[in-house]
Structures are given as structure tokens and as C-alpha cells.
Amino acid sequence: MNNINLVQPLRTQIIHIRSKDADQLTPNFNTNFVVNMKTALSTTTNEEVHVSLMSVEIPYSFYNISNDLENNSLKYTFNGTLYNLSFGNRDYDVFQLVDYFNNSNNHISTVFTTTYDTQENKISMLNKSGATIVINWTQSNINKELGFLVDEPDESVPNGFTSVSRFVVNLATIHSILIKCPNVGSSNVISTRSGNSTILQKVSVDVNSFGIIYLNMSDYRQVTISQASVIDQLVFTLTDQNNRMLQLNNCNFEMSLLFEVYPKYNPELNNNRRMIAGNVSEKNPNRMNNFIERVEEVEPVDDNDSHPIEGKSQIEHDVDRTILDNLIQVVDNNTE
């Protein structure tokens, strides 16, 4: 008989966290902190903890160009002298970026005229210096934002020639926020960067600057399985997709975590089990299995009972008819 064990959590615990209440670990950042739980969450050797993020509210207060993201420097050589154009920690759009190139306070404006092509989304730098200029891409870190390769080779630009973005300008520098908790002891999460991962949840950045980033309906709710016997302290770090700590410029944020304690899966005791959370759907996906179980419980047929169809007894015919009727009912319900 096909038995489906619907496993519900033995107990749950919800933690609401405000960054302003936590103990910060990195100076000038509030995205690396520790939370000491007043009541520890303990499990037995036959239990495991499933951790998931319920909600999060993070201000979009970080900059897309900054020293923290290591993407704010362009170096070039003119007449044997190495110059560094350093972009301030700011939130730039492409027009503000071009204006910064052409700002009379910056040396680069005297040797290059920088323009932007709105249709191709590329930047052009025209050499007007009267001499050859070398753009030292190998020593710069704003390459990708300007439409060049991260490992772009140094480029010599003769007088009267133009350096044009190889690809497109990319100022969407932070794609997602990774919420990490290394001491939960994840056993089911991996990443392409580090193998076994401490990431609790990846949150999409789908709003513009100065808005609020939420864990929305399109973000898959990750469940992290922890084998820790006691959880009494949680250390969190919020980073971008490149593992750089998020600089929120002292803006606070909130998040809520759900801890669910389940019995550990034992293959010797549970051949087939299904985890559930919340309400079970009214349309039971296991209706066919349940029906087959009921059919298997029908009393054995009596071979002496005859039926007009050759080779079938009356009971066998009734069972077949019942199976067919229920199959039709299942199909009808699934198409509603």
C-alpha cells in the first residue's frame, strides 16, 4: 500500500530583527552584525531546523559607484605621467557620469572630450591633447561600468582618435542582495563561488534608488536546513552578488526569520514522506493514490461468480467500473 506521510513542523519560532538593535561588527557598516538570542533554539539528535526568510525591508541607500564597490577609478598616462580620475561615492546616471568626465576641475577634461550615444548606450572619449594617451585599463576598476572588459588590456589612443565602449555602459552595479548567516550550519545550499554556501536568501534589487527593497512574490523562498543542535547566536552579513559588503550609509533595515523544527528523515522508517507548511490544498494531488489504496483493500474475488463478459466475475467487473468512474471524476475535477 502506498502511504504518504505528511510531515508538519514539531515547533516553530519567528525572529524579528532590526539592524539598529543588533551589535555591529564592522566599523562604518551596519550590514555585518550579530544577534544574541535570549532563548536558544535547541534540537535533539533526531531533529533538524529549517530556516527561511519571511520578509525583509532594505532601503536602496547604497551607491552604484563607490570605493566600497571598488569601481570608482580610471587611470591614464599622458606625457609620461600617470593620472587617476577618482569618482566620488555617488549614485550616477550615465549623463552625470559624462558630466564628471567633462568637469573642468578634472585633468581628464583637458585631454579628452567625452560623449554618450543614447542609441548604442556607449561612451566615446576623443583625444584632443595633441599627443598619444594610454588608458591604463589594467590599473583601473571602473572598466565594466564604462563598457569595457574587467581584464581589458591597456589602450593607446593617438591624438584625434576616439576610445569607444567595447560593450554597453552598465551602471546597474548591484543586481541582488545576499543575506548570509555562517553559523547556521547549512547542509543543503551551494553556490558557484564557494561550494557549500552560507547564503540564507537572495533578494532581487527591483526598485530604483531611494526606494525600499522587499522580499517580493517573485523571489523564491529558500529553505536552509541546519544540523546545529543549538542556535543561540546569529551572525549576519549583507553583500552584493560579488561578495562585497553592502554600504547602506547608516540607513537601518528590518527582516524576519522563520525557524521550523522537523523530525529528521529516516529511510528505514519513512519510505515516502511529504513536507508541508500551511494549509493543504483542497484538491488533494494524492487522490489517485488514495483511491488505489482503497481499491487494493477490496475483498478477494470469488472465481465462481460468473459474468456475461468472458473471463470476468461480477465483482471484477464492478471493481473495473468503479476505477473507471473515479478516473473520470479525477479528470473532471482537474479540468475545473
Image (cartoon, rainbow, N blue to C red):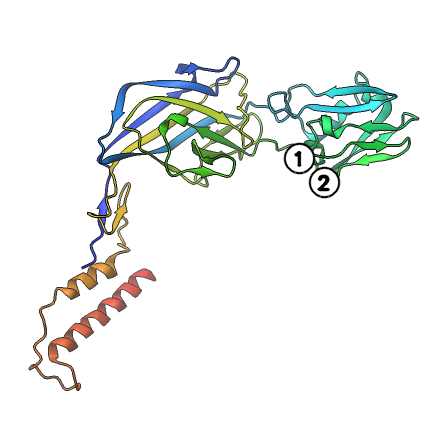
Q: Secondary structure at mark 1?
A: loop
Q: Is residue 31 left or right of residue 316?
A: right
| Amino acid identity at mark 2 | Phe
Cβ–Cβ under 8 Å for marks 2 and 1: yes
Q: Residue at x 40, y 31 (%)?
A: 55
Q: Nearer the viewer, residue 79 or 17?
A: 79
Q: 293 or 81, which is in the foreground?
A: 81
- Across and down, in percent, residue 34 comes to 40, 18
User: In the drawing, does residue 38 fall left or right of residue 207?
Assistant: left
**150 over 320 or under it: above or below:** above
Q: Quadrant of residue 105?
A: top right
Instruction: Classify 119 as above or below 54.
Output: below
Relative image position of residue 335 (x, y in whole percent): 34, 62
Q: Can you identify the residue that label 2 sits on? A: 167
- Residue pictured at 56% horizontal, 34% vertical: 175
Viewer-nearest residue: 334 or 15: 15
Nearest to the observer: residue 111 or residue 182: 182
The image position of residue 269, as x and y in percent, is: 19, 47
The residue carrying mark 1 is 170
Q: Which mark is residue 67?
A: none
